Amino acid sequence: MKPSQLLLVILSILVASGVCREQYKIVIVGAGAAGIATATKLLENGIDDILVLEAESRIGGRINTVNFHGCNVDLGAEWVGGEVNNVVYETLKDRNLLYLLTRDVFPEKFYLSSRQMISEKLSKELFDAVFAAFDINTGTGPHNSTGSVIQQRYRENIIKKFKAGDGDMDIFIWAEDFLRHFFLFAKGSFSWYDNAYTSDHETCPGYQNYGWKNHGYGKFLDVLIRKYPNPSRQLPFFEKLLVDKEVTKITVNDDHIVINCSDNSHYKANHVVFTTSIGVLKENHKKLFSPKLPIYKQLAIERIGIGAVIKVFLKYEHEWWGNSSGFNFIWTEKDRISSRTEFPEGPENKYGQSWITEIYNVIVIPNSRILLVVFTGEMIPVIEKLDDQIVTNGIKFTLKKFLGHLYKIMEPQTMIRSNWYHNPHFRGTYSFSSINSTGEDVKNLMAPIKNAEGCPIILFAGEATSPLHHSSAHGAVESGFREAERLINIYKN
Ligand SMILES: Cc1cc2nc3c(=O)[nH]c(=O)nc-3n(C[C@H](O)[C@H](O)[C@H](O)COP(=O)(O)OP(=O)(O)OC[C@H]3O[C@@H](n4cnc5c(N)ncnc54)[C@H](O)[C@@H]3O)c2cc1C
Ligand SMILES: *[C@@H]1O[C@H](CO)[C@@H](O)[C@H](O)[C@H]1NC(C)=O
Ligand SMILES: *[C@@H]1O[C@H](CO)[C@@H](O)[C@H](O)[C@H]1NC(C)=O
Ligand SMILES: *[C@@H]1O[C@H](CO)[C@@H](O)[C@H](O)[C@H]1NC(C)=O
Ligand SMILES: *[C@@H]1O[C@H](CO)[C@@H](O)[C@H](O)[C@H]1NC(C)=O
């Protein structure tokens, strides 16, 4: 075959497969939970003139289950929280894929960097104090930071509890940093002073901590695509998908929308459903959309918050931690100050303390030889940039410091970690209600852009557009279903 003939054959295959179409009804930007939910809902309703463009070479976005030496670990979403109004839980509840964690995701026991023992009773009191302060459903008015409210409540409770000079009081004072970490893990902001005290966010009622039996969150995507439980009934999702397609420009013309990608390809559509994180929008919206997004939407993008956490999974030869479910750490004032001289590798925080003082707990992944360490807070950007070896050394040093007298701490065999903040296709982990935003901003972010006839042409999905469940995987799925329904209604009428 001559090269020109070959080219013709390839082209005709592409046209036949629907990849090289003139104009699609709907182009979906992003194949995370929201994009997949949109696509599958459309396919289920007989709308199959669609194309999904995904910048990464894999689907799932912030759901990313990876096989880590024979064990499924989640670099992104991991737990299903709540039952009622939780579309993920409702889809899965009769499928025997989830199990209820018998404890909180966080372990119960606290340890001090000074190695002074903390009794079980005191551990419990500490956790109770943390939870009592964490209850964010009662209190003052809007635009107050959750950090300041929680901090004040925590301090007031300590003062009520102790007379000055009590030995345990110091431990409670130091544990405020643990409380902050606990909060930042839930909210993903860099500082707890960035979070709005009041928001429309709703915790789904019911049990909050479901894990996956021998799977990871990625299994849910198989359920959406109907690859599971019966692969022969799978929706033709993968036939509509192109990966390694980074969308760089969305241009609205009179009768169609042009979508340009970084590989110089372009696609045309009647509607675009845009599903990337708000981190991607913050960074790119001005150059992505032509014409520029309306001001109300630009403001929403600026105001709604997103920060990041880092998950580090470490695999060991043995479970040196015995039957423990994990460890919570409290740094003493003295050990914070000496942390930099004791462990000089890597950066320091704004107080001149080592980055390892950002290690607050270790979670045991059940039935594996794996530990999870979660970093939070304003050092995330620099910690993400550290060499694997320094991260491993820092964690090992910290484990020895807190637990070396109780356990024989081993060298991990290997580690894997996330880099959501620096990845240009995410720029953060999950959105949060910022001191600068209100529920109105979420509604403005979600509102579709309409043409002169009032027909929605650019639609917005993704976790940050979920008024009640933003920041969660179920919020993302819900938003995808919502925008698919919007389009289905247009085509029905
Ligand atoms: C570390 C971590 C832990 C989490 N833990 C939980 C948890 O335990 N429980 C829970 O419910 N939720 C959790 N979440 C939140 C949950 O993962 C997200 O809310 C949800 O997965 C977001 O889905 P999405 O579709 O809105 O966005 P994304 O998953 O970000 O999907 C958007 C897609 O768009 C793609 N994209 C970006 N830019 C472009 C472009 N220019 N062109 C084309 N494609 C592009 C991205 O690659 C991505 O695939 C966690 C998230 C993280 C990161
Ligand atoms: C913010 O919260 C703090 C701490 O509870 C309180 O002292 C302050 O009055 C609050 N401010 C507003 C504007 O609500
Ligand atoms: C809130 O807005 C102020 C002023 O624009 C800005 O400096 C600050 O960084 C914003 N905070 C957050 C959490 O977005
Ligand atoms: C998008 O692609 C079309 C077709 O290749 C091209 O004419 C147009 O200039 C591109 N737009 C941008 C902004 O790159
Ligand atoms: C864990 O192990 C310790 C000592 O090895 C034992 O005393 C304790 O009862 C065990 N706890 C559980 C929950 O199995």
Image (spheres, rainbow, N blue to C red):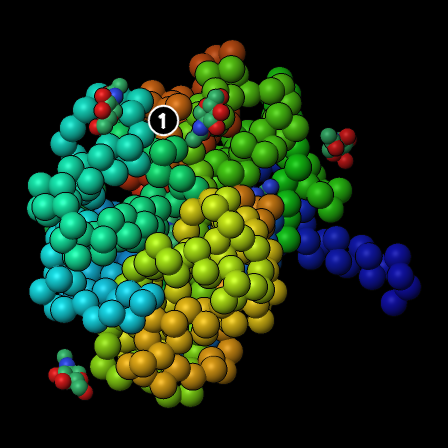
Residue appearing at x 26%, y 53% in the figure:
175
Q: Quadrant of the C terminus?
A: top left
Disc 1 C-beta below 8 A from ligand 3: yes
Whether residue 98 appears in this view of the structure is no
Given residues 435 and 28, the one toward you in this image is 435
- Determine the residue located farthest toward the top in the rendered image: 452
- Ligand 4 falls in which quarter? top right
Quick check: 388 left or right of 130? Answer: right
Which residue is painted at 38% across and 67% down in the image? 372
Quadrant housing residue 100: bottom left
Q: Secondary structure at mark 1?
A: loop
Query: How many residues crowd mark 1 within 10 Å: few (<14), some (14–19), many (20+)?
Result: many
Residue lying farthest bottom?
318
The kind of residue on which mark 1 rests is Ile
Q: Position of residue 70 (x, y in %)?
A: 43, 81
Q: Is residue 194 above or below residue 218?
A: above
Q: Residue furthest front?
A: 165
Q: Label 1 belongs to which residue?
A: 435
Task: Name the image quarter holding the N terminus.
Answer: bottom right
Pick the front one: 156 or 28:
156
